[in-house]
């Protein structure tokens, strides 16, 4: 394997880690970790929201903290490298639960994240994010499932007892 091919594999592994880190921090609403995923001058387009990193921080916190449960599942990203720039296309399924009205509502989103990443001073971070929605579904819960003998992902956050596992 050539040095160039090995370097490309290492870059793609780091970029895949960035996508996974983004999904993980959304589920755990650990907003401080956003700074390690996005460049400060990153731009965002969700359709209903377009803006810079500072505005995105407020938008995403309000949106995600309104859910009792969040699960962002990303498919393996397709990554195209061009020097110090990468284009990333990652499919996703997102399931979010609200508690009100009781026993709750589950919203499911199927779509993809179109991302651009840049390597600056040897470090990769995301520089643009565009979300493309393919399908949305809303289900009014008929019963509260928390009576089951399971550990549920309710109210995950940096102070949650299981949060240390998310940063491992």
Image (spheres, rainbow, N blue to C red):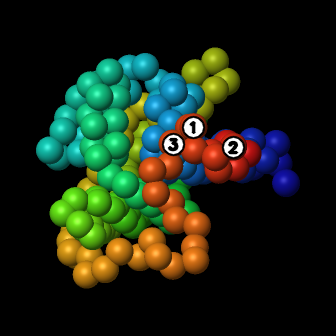
On screen, residue 1 versus residue 101, left or right, reads: right
Tell whether 52 sits left or right of 166.
left
Q: Measured along the vertical axis of the image, is residue 106 above or below residue 115?
A: below
Sequence-first disc among 2 and 3: 3
Image point 37% across, 50% down: which residue? 114
Residue contact at pointers 1 and 2, CB within 8 angstroms:
no
**Residue designated by label 1:** 159
Circles 3 and 1 in contact, beta carbons < 8 Å: yes
Please identify the quarter of the rendering in which residue 42 is found: top left
Q: Residue 81 sits in which quadrant?
A: top right
Q: Residue at x 32, y 21 (%)?
A: 54
Classify mark 1: helix, strand or loop: loop
Eye-nearest disc, 1 or 2: 1
Vertical position of residue 98 compared to residue 26: above or below? below
- Is residue 137 among the parts visible in the rendering? no
Residue 159 picture location, percent across and down: 57, 37
Number of other residues with Cα within 10 Å of mark 1, as a class: few under 14, some 14 to 19, many 20 or more: few
- Quadrant for residue 144, please give it: bottom left
Quadrant of the drawing holding the N terminus: bottom right
Q: Position of residue 18 (x, y in %)?
A: 57, 43
Q: Which is more N-terminal, label 2 or label 1?
A: 1
Looking at the image, which residue is at 51% across and 27% down?
32
Inter-mark Cα distance, 1 to 2: 9 Å
Residue tagged 3: 157
Which secondary structure lies at badge 3? loop
- The numbered disc on residue 164 is 2
């Amino acid at each position: 394997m050539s040095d160039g091919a090995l370097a490309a594999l290492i870059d793609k592994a780091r970029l895949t880690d960035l996508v996974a880190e983004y999904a993980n921090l959304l589920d755990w609403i650990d907003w401080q970790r956003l700074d390690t995923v996005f460049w400060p001058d990153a731009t965002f387009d969700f359709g209903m929201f377009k803006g810079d990193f500072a505005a995105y921080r407020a938008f995403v916190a309000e949106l995600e903290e309104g859910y009792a449960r969040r699960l962002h599942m990303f498919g393996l990203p397709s990554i195209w490298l061009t020097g110090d720039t990468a284009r990333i296309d990652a499919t996703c399924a997102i399931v979010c639960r609200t508690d009100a009205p009781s026993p709750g509502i589950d919203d499911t989103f199927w779509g993809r994240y179109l991302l651009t990443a840049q390597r600056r001073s040897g470090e990769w971070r995301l520089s643009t994010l565009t979300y493309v929605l393919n399908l949305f579904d809303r289900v009014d819960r008929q019963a509260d499932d928390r009576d089951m003998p399971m550990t549920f992902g309710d109210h995950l956050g940096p102070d949650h007892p299981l949060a240390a596992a998310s940063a491992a």
